[in-house]
Image (spheres, rainbow, N blue to C red):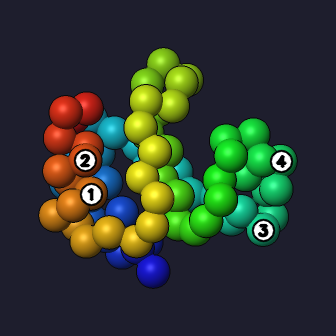
Amino acid sequence: MIAPILEQIEAEHGDRLTVAKINGDDHPDIVARYGVMGFPTLNLYRDGEVVQQIIGAKPKRALLAALNGHL
């Protein structure tokens, strides 16, 4: 549902971030490790640590606003 938006963000900001997607149904261990309770959940990592978690589908404008301090 938000994959096209993430692809746009990666195309526009790919020099400063990497977008990686996993299927939670295929990787329940990762879902449990990060306490994901609903989909979509976006985790923003810096140096291997989660610095922000965004839960739920958001429009591009909202995602960019949430990422703004990290880009």
The answer to which of marks 3 and 1 sits earlier in the sequence is: 3
Residue density around tag 2, few if under 14, some if 14–19, many if 20 or more, within 10 Å: some
Q: Which x, y percent locates residue 8?
A: 26, 65
Are discs 2 and 1 less than 8 Å apart at CB?
yes
Are discs 2 and 4 less than 8 Å apart at CB?
no
Q: Which mark is residue 18?
A: none
The answer to which of marks 4 and 1 sits earlier in the sequence is: 4
Farthest residue to the top: give it. Answer: 47
Residue density around tag 3, few if under 14, some if 14–19, many if 20 or more, within 10 Å: few
The answer to which of marks 2 and 4 sits earlier in the sequence is: 4
Distance Cα–Cα, label 2 vs label 1: 5 Å
Residue pointed to by mark 2: 66
Distance Cα–Cα, label 2 vs label 4: 26 Å
Are discs 4 and 3 less than 8 Å apart at CB?
no
Location of residue 2 with respect to 24 vertically, above or below: below
Q: Which x, y percent locates residue 23?
A: 68, 65
Residue pointed to by mark 3: 25
Q: Residue 63 carries which label?
A: 1
Q: What residue is at 36 percent from the left and 63 percent from the top?
A: 6
User: What amino acid type should be assigned to the residue bearing mark 2?
Assistant: Ala
User: What amino acid type should be assigned to the residue bearing mark 1?
Assistant: Leu
| Residue 15 seen | no
User: What amino acid type should be assigned to the residue bearing mark 3?
Assistant: Asp
User: What amino acid type should be assigned to the residue bearing mark 4?
Assistant: Asp
Residue pointed to by mark 4: 29
Distance Cα–Cα, label 4 vs label 3: 10 Å
The quarter in which the C terminus is drawn is top left
Q: Which of 45 and 33 is in front in this view?
A: 33
